[in-house]
Image: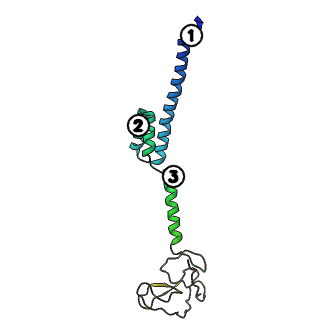
């Protein structure tokens, strides 16, 4: 019994060393996790350093404060979100593609420069490009009637102009 009582300080020293090591590991882990997390959420170097120092100085409280104040999404998530929005905007916009050959064309072109398909017709009043199926000019309000398509000669080969209406969105 006396030997057990004499060894209590040794056991307490070993137990406190183990607990201290675990606490130091948790403290270091929180600091490293915070630094990695803020680096993924912000490019601001000062914010990265301040968040890490906050968790180092006030381990548990600093981590709670950091979790409340950190940016909601990571830089990668923000980039993916912006790409999704850009893709949606492009899908909403009028397709700039020739229905005859599939080549990209400007929205102001009346004819496709590659296959010579008629894409739009000019407004008789203001010369704005109009879709083939429109009966009213949205720019000046002029009434538009279907026009007879005249063939256009090409330098590569002689082909008649096709009167193809673009697919409606």
Q: CA distance from mark 2 to mark 1?
A: 40 Å
For residue 87, the mark is none
Q: CB under 8 Å between callouts 1 and 3?
A: no
**Dot in front, 2 or 1:** 1
Looking at the rendered structure, the secondary structure element under dot 3 is helix
Tell me the tag on residue 76: 3
The residue under label 1 is 7
Percent across and percent down for residue 30 are 49, 36
Ranked by sequence position, the earlier of labels 1 and 3 is 1
Question: Which residue is more in the foreground, 78 or 155?
Answer: 78
Label 3 neighbour load within 10 Å: few <14, some 14-19, many 20+: few
Q: Assign a secondary structure to mark 2.
A: helix
Q: Write the residue at 60% across / 6% down.
A: 1
Note whether 152 is above or below 48 in the view shown: below
Furthest-front residue in view?
A: 1
Look at 51% across and 28% down and name the residue there.
23
Which residue occupies 56% across, 8% down? Answer: 5
Q: Quadrant of the C terminus?
A: bottom right
Neighbourhood count class around disc 1 (C-alpha, 10 Å): few under 14, some 14–19, many 20 upward: few
C-alpha separation, residue under disc 2 versus residue under disc 3: 24 Å
Q: Which structural element holds mark 1?
A: helix
In this view of the protein, which residue sits in the foreground, 90 or 112? 90
Q: Earlier in the sequence, mark 2 or mark 1?
A: 1
Of the residues tagged 1 and 3, which is closer to the observer? 1
Q: Which residue is mark 2?
A: 54
Q: In the image, what residue occupies the spot 49% across and 46% down?
A: 40
Number of numbered callouts drawn? 3
Nearer the camera: disc 2 or disc 3: 2
User: Residue 105, image x and y in percent?
Assistant: 53, 76
Earlier in the chain: of badge 2 and badge 3, it is 2
């Amino acid at each position: 019994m006396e030997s057990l009582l004499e060894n209590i300080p040794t056991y307490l020293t070993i137990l406190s060393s183990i607990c201290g090591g675990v606490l130091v590991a948790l403290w270091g882990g929180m600091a490293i996790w915070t630094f990695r997390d803020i680096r993924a959420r912000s490019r601001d170097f000062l914010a990265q350093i301040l968040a890490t120092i906050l968790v180092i100085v006030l381990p548990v409280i600093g981590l709670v404060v950091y979790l409340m104040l950190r940016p909601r999404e990571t830089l990668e998530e923000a980039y993916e979100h912006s790409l999704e929005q850009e893709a949606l905007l492009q899908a909403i916009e009028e397709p700039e593609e020739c229905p005859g050959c599939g080549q990209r064309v400007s929205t102001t072109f009346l004819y496709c420069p590659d296959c010579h398909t008629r894409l739009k017709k000019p407004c008789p009043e203001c010369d704005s490009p109009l879709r083939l199926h429109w009966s009213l000019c949205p720019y000046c309000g002029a009434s538009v009637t279907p026009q007879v398509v005249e063939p256009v000669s090409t330098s590569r080969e002689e082909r008649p102009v096709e009167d193809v209406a673009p697919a409606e969105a």
